[in-house]
Image: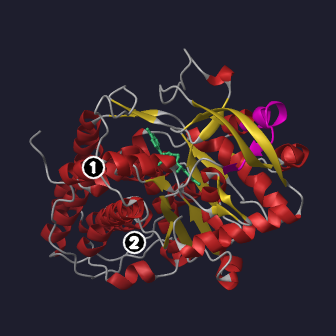
Amino acid sequence: MEKFYVTTPIYYVNDVPHIGHFYTSLAADALARYWRMRGRDVFLLTGTDENSQKNVEAAAKRGYDDVQAYIDMMSGRWFAIFRDLGITFDGFIRTTEERHRIGVEEFWRRVESTGDIYLGEYEGLYCAGCEAFITESDLTDGQCPVHRKEPQRIKEKNYFFRLSAYRERLLEHIDAHPEFIQPVSRRNEVRSYVERFMEDISISRETMKWGIPVPGDPTQVIYVWFDALINYLTGIGFGDDQERFGRYWPADVQLVGKDIIKFHCALWPAMLMSAGIPLPKKVFAHGFFTIDGEKISKSLGNAVDPQAAAERYGIDALRFFLLREITFGEDGDFSMDRLGERYANDLANELGNLSHRVLSMTAKYFAGKVPPATDGSLGPVWDRYDQAMADLRFGAALDAIWDLLRDSNRLIDAEQPWKLAKTDQERLAAVLYTLLERLRASAWMLRPLLPETAGKMRRQLGLSEEEFDREYEAARVWGGIAENATIAKSEPLFPRRDD
Ligand code: MSP
């Protein structure tokens, strides 16, 4: 069986997830569900990045003496929140876990044995917000432009990774594999960074106490990014379950936000090359979004809680909004008002209403039974949808489905089944069969995107649970809705709201 391995970044636990974090995980979930539906052996990995100074500071701020206790509690919350929001992860890796430490040590030794680790002196600036060494030229008014904080000045003995030794190989790889970094604009950004700026980097810290000790030198801990990136390997068994590791690696898609692209497209592949491990097939960087036009920030207090948004409109409406309104790969804006509009128009009106009309007419004119099958075709919609999903164009996948739904609404208006009921029974049956069949196809295509809604549609169409266990290729064929099957009473998919 073909596999599909998809990863999300692992998240810092200095706070609970906001809508931006949920966004990355949602995209990974949609992909994972899609490839599961197509019969692949899927593994979706997510987790928490725990060896960060940020977490240590957050623990202190909240009055925890025991950093690990704070991190355990917070990691548990991230786990539960993602699970409750319907993210179907297969693995959850925590970087303070023993299995992770074992894999990181193994990885370090491999890189060391290639001669790519050397001892040096680091003198310069460090931004704890970025967890990265930065240069004077990165600063605005002496502050990190992202975190608006003065960086720490550091002078310490560190282990360095010979990153610059991989410049040529990396450029060759980027050029030979246009699919490696997506979208294209990001590829160009990374390429010029690798070509012009990529230097050796310090991969240990002398003054930090929290983290994984450097193998053979307990006076240093491993730099948090070097440790964190390895989660993508340890999360599937590197270092403790070689069989499982071999089954899933290399990753098919690694999803990241555009803020962390250099770590994933320069440092990470060079680390893998050094350790003699194949590179992931694709790293896809999505954009960032603002809330009502403003950057998500604690000081503005505008961080939207994904659970609150899901409680208000339902998880599927939130999923729809994020995947449809914001083009995947580009920046966008989140607004509760826009979410409300999408709910009323696209979901309640175009999808909910169509489903309700079709089911009620079937009840009324055919006593709730699917009329006799008629010939037909779904046209190119399913191909369009598959192509969009394979390219991570979630909005385009939804568009393909919505074109079918809108066309179905038009078909009802044009055919006027209530008139056909008096004049042409045969045509009425053909129209309704077509509409029911299109709803079945839509339910299928919606499974990875709006899983709850897809399930409701399946039940309303009188299809058993086994319907969704069928082979994907067979399900794509016209005529899956069985004639004479009993459809259920229509319950609104997206009840009207007063706000
Ligand atoms: N711990 C690192 C990642 C290590 S991966 C080896 C990290 N964590 S994070 O919690 O700060 O952010 C993780 C991801 O959340 C970002 O890369 C991005 O994907 C997502 N987002 C955070 N804020 C976001 C927005 N405002 N908009 C969209 N995505 C956002 O970085």
Q: Is residue 216 above or below residue 140?
A: below
**The one of 174 and 217 positioned closer to us in this rendering:** 217
Q: Nearer the viewer, residue 352 or 478?
A: 352
Furthest residue toward left: 498
Q: Quadrant of residue 74?
A: bottom left
The residue type indicated by label 1 comes to Leu
Which stretch appears magenta?
190-205
Residue 66 higher or lower than 286, as above or below? below
State which quadrant residue 42 falls in: bottom right
Would you say residue 68 sits in the magenta stretch? no
Say which quarter of the image contains residue 209: bottom right
Left or right: residue 222 compared with residue 63: right
Residue 411 appears in the picture as rendered? no
Q: Secondary structure at mark 2?
A: loop
**Foreground mark, 1 or 2?**
1
- Quadrant of the snapshot with the C terminus: top left
Tell me if residue 8 comes above or below residue 370 in the rendering. above
Q: Which mark is residue 158?
A: none
Graded by Cα atoms within 10 Å as few (under 14), some (14 to 19) or many (20 or more), the crowding at tag 2 reads: some
> Which quarter of the rendered picture does the N terminus lie within?
bottom right
Q: Tell me which numbered mark, 1 or 2, is placed earlier along the sequence.
A: 1
Observer able to see residue 398 = yes
Please, what is the three-letter code of the amino acid marked with disc 2? Thr
Q: Nearer the viewer, residue 85 or 141?
A: 141
* 312 relative position to 87: left or right: left
Report which residue position mark 2 lands on.
374
Residue extending farthest top = 141
